[in-house]
Amino acid sequence: MQVLITGGAGLLGARLARELLKRGTLTNAQGEQTPITRITLLDVVPARGFDDPRIQIVTGDIADEKVIDSVLTPQTQSIFHLAAIVSGQAEADFELGMRINFDATRLILERARKNGNCPRVVFTSSVAVFGGDLPAVVPDAQVLTPQSSYGAQKVMGELLVNDYSRKGFIDGRALRMPTVCVRPGAPNKAASSFASGIIREPLNGAEAICPVAPETPMWLLSPRHAIESLIHGHDIDGSLFGSSRALSLPGLATTVSEMVAALERVVGAEVVKRIRWQPDPAIIRIVNTWPGNFATVRGDALGFQRDASFDDIVRGYIEDESIRVV
Amino acid sequence: MQVLITGGAGLLGARLARELLKRGTLTNAQGEQTPITRITLLDVVPARGFDDPRIQIVTGDIADEKVIDSVLTPQTQSIFHLAAIVSGQAEADFELGMRINFDATRLILERARKNGNCPRVVFTSSVAVFGGDLPAVVPDAQVLTPQSSYGAQKVMGELLVNDYSRKGFIDGRALRMPTVCVRPGAPNKAASSFASGIIREPLNGAEAICPVAPETPMWLLSPRHAIESLIHGHDIDGSLFGSSRALSLPGLATTVSEMVAALERVVGAEVVKRIRWQPDPAIIRIVNTWPGNFATVRGDALGFQRDASFDDIVRGYIEDESIRVV
C-alpha cells in the first residue's frame, strides 16, 4: 500500500516514516496488515536521512492544489496529515494559519474525496481545541471553545474529518496530541516550544529560558508514544470511534516543576541550573488557555498508550538522540 | 448606520428588514441606538414588497467575492448573515452546502476584516450543530458532534465568528435557531419543513403530510420571536457572551402531537383531519439527530425570549398572514 505523510520532514513525520519502514506494514481498508510499497514524505523542506527505495521525498506547499494532486492519488490508501503552522505563528499570522491549517487540510480531504478510494486519514489535532472556562480535568465530552486561531483551525479540521468520514468520502481519525516533549533540534514558534527547550538545551550544555511559572500544568506525550499513537490510531477500526472521529490522546499530566525535578533525578543538579525563569506574558496567555489534565476514557478504551513518567521521557530522549550529558 | 441582510428575500430576512424599518434604529459600536440610513437586502432572488428609500435590493450569489465586495463596505456597521442552504439540500449536495454555508460565511467575514471597521455580525446557526449521543435536555456546555453536513458547516461558521471576534476583526454573535415555525409560503428542502407544513397546509384547506411520528420532540421558535431574537442578539453588548460568541436561543419544547392538538384547539377538529401521517425514513433519520429540549441558561440570562405556547404560535401565524380559516 501507498502512504502519504504531510509534514514528512518534521520530527513526527520523519520518525513515523522510519517506524513504518521498520514495521513494513499498515492495516488496509479490509483490516489486514499489508506491505507498505511507498511512503511519500511531503514538506516545505526535503526530508533528510532516508535511504530506502520505498521512500519518495517531495518538496512543496501543501496548500497548493497542484502539489496535493501530485502526491495524493487513488493509489494512496493511507494519509498521515501532520503538517501545520504552529500555535504562536498562527496567532501572529492569521492568513498563513488559515491557509496551512485549514485550507490545506480541506484540499487534502477534497482530493481524497474525488479520488474515490476512501483512504484512512490520520489528522493531528491538538489540546488547543480546548479553552475558556475549563474543569481541572477535561472530560471527553468537553465543549470546544478554542481561544487561539490555531485551536479554531484544528476544530474546523476535526469537523471536516468527521463529516467526510460520515459521508464515506474518507475513513478519518482526528487525534488531539498533547504537547510533544522532548523535541530535538531548534526551538520553534509554538507557544509550547519551551517545554522541550527547558530539557533539551540544558542537556546540550546551553542555557534555557522558561517563560511560564513552575506550577504550570503540562499534558505531555513523548515522540515515541506519539508515533505509537499515530500508527495505532490508523490501524484500529474506524467504527470504534462512534459518533465522533476526534478524540483526546492519553498523555502524562505533570507540571513544569515536576519536569525539572525529573531532569535533575536523571542527570543531576548541575544541568538544571542552566534553566533561567523569565516570564513571557504572550506565551503565558496562550499556555494558560490549555488544560493540564484530561480524563481520556475513550482513548484509553481504544488502546492508546501514555508515558509512565517524565523520568522515562527524559531517559527516552537521551537514548533516542544519543545525548552525552555534559 | 448601514445594515446588510443576507438571505434578505427569505422569510426571516424580509421580516427583519420590515421590523428594522419600523423601529428605525439599531445599536452602534458605541452602544447607542442610531438611525438606520440603509438596509441592503442581498439574496439570489430580489426581495419583494418594499417601498422605502432606505431599502437597497441586490440580487447575487453570496459566495461570489465581487457580489460581497459590492454590498459590504467600511460603511456597513451591521451584518445579519441569514443566507444558507437548508439541511436536506446540504446533505444531498455536499459541494453546494460547503460553498454557501461555509465559503460564503468566510467570504463575508474576510471582507469585514479587510474593511477594518469591526462591524456587528449576527450569524444564524442551528440546533443541527448537535447530534450523536445527547441528553434529553441539552445544556449550553454540550459538546458539538453534528451528524449532518449542514450542522458541521454551521459549527465551522460559529468557529469563524468566534475567532474573528476574539481577534477584534468583527463583533460577532452566532445564534442557534430552533426550528422556525410556522413558515408561510411553499415547503422548502429543510428536513424540518414538515413542522410548518402540518400547520400551514391544513389552514389553507390543503392536505399535509407528516413524515415523522406524533411523539417526535420539537424545539420551536415563531417568526415573531425569531426576529426579536436577531435584533436583541445584535443590540446587546458582545462582551456579555463571554468566551464563546455562540449560544442556543431559548425556544418552545413541544412534540408533533402537541402541535396538532394546539392547532385543533385554535381552529377545530376539521382542519386537523387534513394531516396525513406517512413516515419518511430519510427525514426521520435527520430529525432524530436533533434534540427536542434545551436548557438555555445563557440565552435566558442574556434576555432572549421564547414563545409561551404553541397555541400562541398558531394564533400569531393566523394574524401575521391574515389567514381566513376554511
Image (spheres, coloured by chain):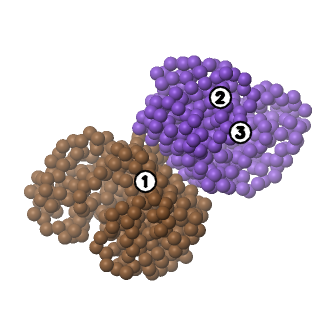
Chain colours: A purple, B brown
Could you say whether the residue bearing mark 2 is in a helix, strand or loop?
strand
Q: Depth check: give the residue in front, B272 or A122.
A: A122
- The residue at the point 55 percent across, 51 percent down is A145
What is the number of the mark on residue A56? 2
Residue under label 1, please give it: B101
Query: Residue A31 or A130: which is nearer the viewer?
Result: A31
Against B111, residue A238 (above or below) is above
x%, y% of residue B135? 40, 44
Residue under mark 1: which chain is it in? B
Question: In the rendered image of this protein, does residue A86 appear above or below residue B237?
Answer: above
Determine whether, in the image, residue B189 is placed left or right of residue A163.
left
Residue type at mark 1 is Asn
Q: Quadrant of residue A243?
A: top left
Q: Is residue B56 left or right of residue B11?
A: right
Q: CA distance from mark 2 to mark 3?
A: 13 Å
The quadrant holding residue A318 is: top right
Neighbor class of circle 3 (other Cα within 10 Å; few <14, some 14-19, many 20+) is some
Marks 1/2 same chain: no
Q: Is residue A288 visible?
A: no
Q: Amino acid at mark 2?
A: Gln
Q: Where in the figure is residue A26, as x and y percent of width and height?
A: 57, 22
Picture disc at residue A45: 3
Of labels 1 and 2, the one closer to you? 2
Asked if labels 3 and 1 touch by Cβ distance under 8 angstroms, the answer is: no
Three-letter code, disc 3 = Val
Counting every numbered tag in the picture gives 3
Element at label 1? helix
The secondary element bearing badge 3 is classed as loop
